[in-house]
Amino acid sequence: MAQKTDRRRADWPEKYADLLGKIPDREVADLAGVGVSSIKKLRLGKGIRFGRRRDRPWNPKDDRLLGKYTDKQAARMLVRDVREITQRRRALGLPPARPGYRL
């Protein structure tokens, strides 16, 4: 008896490539019918990071946290990358906060 190939699995990279990095890997995996590790491997192979927030605009409320908390603490609070926090703080001319010191 010849094995039947699953067409859905054979063409999933092309069919779901536009969703990579836009929705969680688990959701893409469920849609494509493949494992999460396959989705992650393809996404990373294409250089696509998930959850990038760089396009999110800064607001004055966010800016007020910079320099009051360490860049790492501010990154956790604002759900942004530490490098992004550091770049913004420097652009505003703010000195880094000392660890353990709060205003």
Image (tube, rainbow, N blue to C red):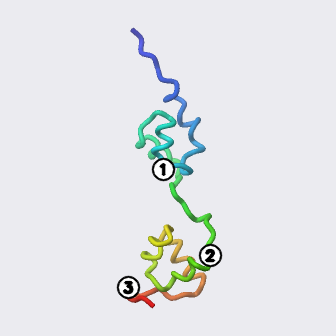
Quarter holding the N terminus is top left
Q: Amino acid at mark 3?
A: Pro
Residue at far left of view:
100
Q: Nearer the viewer, mark 1 or mark 2?
A: 2
| Residue indicated by mark 3 | 99
Position of 2 relative to 81 (above/below): above
Q: How many marks?
A: 3
Badge 1 local density, few (<14 within 10 Å), some, or many (20+)?
few
Q: Amino acid at mark 1?
A: Leu
- Secondary element under disc 3, as helix, strand or loop, is loop
Q: Residue at x 50, y 42 (%)?
A: 28
Q: Which mark is residue 44?
A: 1
Q: Which residue occupies 56% across, 50% down?
A: 22
Q: What percent of the width, then of the height, locates residue 99?
A: 38, 85
* Residue found 45% across the figure and 82% down from its top: 69
Whether residues under marks 3 and 1 lie with C-beta atoms below 8 angstroms apart, the answer is: no
User: Mark 2 highlights which residue?
Assistant: 59
Above-or-below relation of 52 to 11:
below
Residue at mark 3 to residue at mark 1: CA–CA distance: 33 Å
